[in-house]
């Protein structure tokens, strides 16, 4: 691995000056860079704890399905924030000679003593808050983009078919491409994506074509009430919204749907392979 390799950021948690709780691609590996918040200084620590994620692939992270399952991780050490150079957007990628050296020194036998952990809590089963003409997003990764920030990996329900959309990272321009590669997940039903076993079933995929990012309209941020066992939808325009936020009774649940007649036409016109 040459010095100053570009590490693609696949996902991140909080963002304060720089991203934190980062998952990044290191060749075929996934690495986790975690910087804890220090209550005494009221700021994040000035270093990252670095771990190699053994049970997930870069695609699992980008598509968002990793959030539903435990992962095995091998601790590699610590690296100072000042030893990392972030992309000008701060969210797209990073470079670090020390991180490269840390990964190069990794001994695969260390994985025998890997730690089982769950970096994210299991998703709550929030309701699908769909507007007319929109398609339900079944799983999604983190939003990226220097101009338009959208999820770069997601699964969508199109006429009860599971359709995967993946926007690859282009190292030549150090940014994501402006189109998605569209795949039909053979033999999977929409509810399968919500199950922990979805990642381990090894579903086959059928390539359907490309879809320009500009041909997709993503919905607005959705919110839900935690006061109701049914987790009822709450509008930001509701007169009770601000009061509920103050009480911690409303949670943001992200973009849940998209509209794309081009995608629907692509799926409708495809010769879909039957499940074997």
Image (cartoon, rainbow, N blue to C red):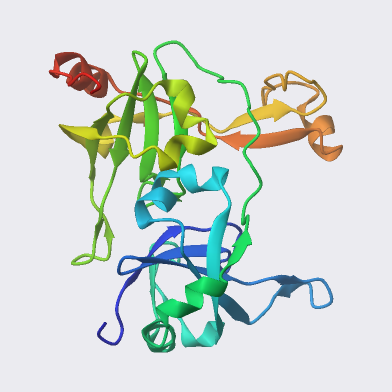
| In the displayed structure image, the side of residue 179 where residue 89 appears, left or right | right
Question: Percent position (x, y) of residue 90?
Answer: 45, 67
Question: What residue is shown at x 51% (from left), y 17% (from top)?
Answer: 130
Quadrant that contains the N terminus: bottom left
Depth check, front residue: 9 or 236: 9
Quadrant that contains the C terminus: top left
Q: Quadrant of residue 44?
A: bottom right
Question: Percent position (x, y) of residue 94?
Answer: 40, 73
| In the displayed structure image, the side of residue 9 where residue 161 appears, left or right | left
Q: Is residue 123 visible?
A: yes
> Image height check: is 214 above or below 186?
below
> Image height check: is 44 above or below 133?
below
Question: What residue is shown at x 44% (from left), y 86% (from top)?
Answer: 102
Q: Is residue 146 visible?
A: no
Question: Percent position (x, y) of residue 147?
Answer: 35, 51
Depth check, front residue: 154 or 92: 154
Depth check, front residue: 162 or 18: 162
Query: Residue reaching furthest top?
Result: 132
Question: What residue is shown at x 43% (from left), y 89% (from top)?
Answer: 98
């Amino acid at each position: 691995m040459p010095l100053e390799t570009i590490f693609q950021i696949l996902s991140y948690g909080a963002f304060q000056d720089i991203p934190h709780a980062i998952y990044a691609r290191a060749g075929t590996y996934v690495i986790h860079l975690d910087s804890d918040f220090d209550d005494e200084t009221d700021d994040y620590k000035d270093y990252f704890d670095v771990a190699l994620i053994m049970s997930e692939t870069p695609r699992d992270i980008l598509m968002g399905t990793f959030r539903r399952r435990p992962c095995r991780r091998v601790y590699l050490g610590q690296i100072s924030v000042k030893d990392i150079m972030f992309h000008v957007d701060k969210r797209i990628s990073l470079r670090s000679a020390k991180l490269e050296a840390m990964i190069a020194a990794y001994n695969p036998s260390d994985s025998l003593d890997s730690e089982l952990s769950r970096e994210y809590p299991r998703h709550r089963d929030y309701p699908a808050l769909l507007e007319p003409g929109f398609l339900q997003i079944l799983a999604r990764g983190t939003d990226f983009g220097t101009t338009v920030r959208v999820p770069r990996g997601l699964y969508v329900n199109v006429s009860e078919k599971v359709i995967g959309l993946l926007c690859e990272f282009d190292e030549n321009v150090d940014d994501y491409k402006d189109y998605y590669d569209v795949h039909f997940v053979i033999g999977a039903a929409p509810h399968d994506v919500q199950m922990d076993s979805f990642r381990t079933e090894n579903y086959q995929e059928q390539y359907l074509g490309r879809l320009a990012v500009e041909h997709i309209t993503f919905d607005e941020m959705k919110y839900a009430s935690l006061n109701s066992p049914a987790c009822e939808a709450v509008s930001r325009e509701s007169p009770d919204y601000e009061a509920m936020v103050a009480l911690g009774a409303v949670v943001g649940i992200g973009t849940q749907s998209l509209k794309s007649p081009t995608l629907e036409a692509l799926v409708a016109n495809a010769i879909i392979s039957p499940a074997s």
